[in-house]
Image (spheres, rainbow, N blue to C red):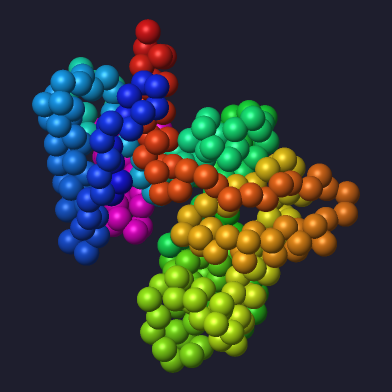
Amino acid sequence: MKCGLVAADGAVLHRETRPTPRAAGGRAVLDALLETVVELGQKATADGHRVRAIGVVVPGIIDAETGTVVAENLAWAATPVRTELVAAVGNDVPVVLAHDVRAGGYAELRQGALKGTTNSLFLPLGTGIAAAMVIDGRLVSGDGYAGELGHSRFIHGDAAELCACGQWGCLETVASAAALARRYAARSGRIVDGSREVLELLAAGDEIAAEVWHDALNVLVDALVLYTTLVAPTRIAIGGGLVGAGETLLQPLRDGVHARLTFQREPEIVAAVLGEEAGCLGAALYAWDRIEELK
């Protein structure tokens, strides 16, 4: 968990990272979240600050009306996250619950690589793949369901792998950071230290790493061409762990999309700039927005 205290002008007064106890189950994850929020509030008070609002962003499907969350990777099934947060901190402080990738996209839109755009996309490539969609100047929520580009099917036939969502051939099964490491290990018989090591092997000329990387680039180009055809973004910001590959990732994506487009408006493809802090900063921005709404 990444967390911090953020002032109204966006200055980060305090930041820290805490473990997420996924192996202990959904209740343990929720308890760790509640403990973090309470202890951050105590720190703010001890440092002479007043907590005006709390922003919490999580993965999964969020029901905006009830504040419940379905998140398979946190073992949450209709978990009443907002209700539990309010019970932990009281009714005096507004609590905003939002999606982590959309929060990251909001931060990039307000202060980062998407600033100044009205139609754009934030696409973090990490353990999984999801997207924050900016259309006509607004982030699209779709009642909590929008943006799951990683669970669109791009691989068919015998090459399709089973995704954690239950579908076969999802983008996430080939192009996520986790998929790179898993697919390299399956083909080589060698366990690697995540996507980072796959990229190191790629740079060293490893043929299997090159095959796995080529597969990922191909489906990512397919996904970006489809999104561009449907929604016409002017800029696409790639984030997440894989953007650390730099131009090894970005230039082939630019070249692949350019070669495929005919009548469509071609988007800029750039690196996101806020890094791992994007989601945390987006949570803070949502919280400060809520304060303005309540004035």
Horizontal side of residue 234 vs 295, given as left or right: right
The residue shown at (24%, 60%) is 22
Query: Residue 206's image quarter?
Result: bottom right
Counting every numbered tag in the picture gives 0
| Residues drawn in magenta | 64-83
- 123 within the magenta span: no
Give the percent coordinates (x, y) of residue 280. 37, 40
Can residue 18 be seen from the camera position used here?
A: yes
- Comparing 30 with 202, the one in front is 202
Can residue 230 be seen from the camera position used here?
A: no
Residue at the farthest top position: 295
Residue at the farthest right position: 263
The residue shown at (27%, 40%) is 15
Q: Is residue 19 above or below residue 157?
A: above
Q: Is residue 45 above or below residue 274?
A: above
Quadrant location, the C terminus: top left
Residue at the farthest front position: 204
Query: Residue 10's image quarter?
Result: top left
Horizontal side of residue 136 vs 66, given as left or right: right
Horizontal side of residue 253 vs 145, given as left or right: right
Give the percent coordinates (x, y) of residue 290. 38, 20
Give the percent coordinates (x, y) of residue 72. 35, 57
The residue shown at (72%, 58%) is 254
Q: Is residue 3 above or below residue 218?
A: above
The residue shown at (43%, 62%) is 127
Give the percent coordinates (x, y) of residue 38. 15, 34
